[in-house]
Amino acid sequence: MESVANVLVGVMVAGFGIVGLFLVAGAADSEMFIFGLGLAVFAVAFNFGLVKRHFDKRDATRGAAREATHV
C-alpha cells in the first residue's frame, strides 16, 4: 500500500513540476521565472528521491533474505 501512495505523490509532484515549467515559459519577470524553475527542479529532485528510496528498500530486503538463507 505504501508504494501506491508513493506513486500518487510522485505523480502529483510531477504535475507541480509541469506547472513550474509553464510558469517559466510565460514568465514576464525574474521572480516568477526563478519560482517556476525552482518548482520544476524540486519536482525532479523529489521524484529521483522516491526512486532511490524504492531501490534502497528493495536492496535491503534482498540483502536480508540473502543473510537469512546463508545462516
Image (tube, grey):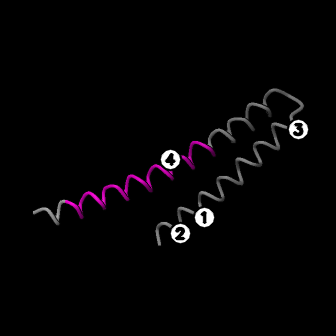
Name the residue type under label 3.
Gly
Task: First in sequence, mark 4 or 3: give its number.
Answer: 3
Q: Secondary structure at mark 1?
A: helix
Could you say which disc has been placed on residue 8 in the image? 1
Quadrant location of the C terminus?
A: bottom left
Q: Secondary structure at mark 3?
A: loop
| Residue 4 circle label | 2
Task: Name which of mark 2 and mark 4 comes first in the sequence.
Answer: 2
Front in this rendered view, residue 4 or 38: 4
| Marks 2 & 1, CB-CB < 8 Å contact | yes
The answer for how far apart the CA atoms under marks 2 and 1 are is: 6 Å
Q: Please state the horizontal and vertical placement of residue 30, each as a whole percent of the image.
A: 81, 26
| Mark toward the start of the polypeptide (1 vs 3) | 1
- Image-based side of 66 in relation to 47, left or right: left
Q: CA distance from mark 3 to mark 2?
A: 33 Å
CA gap between label 2 and label 4 equals 16 Å
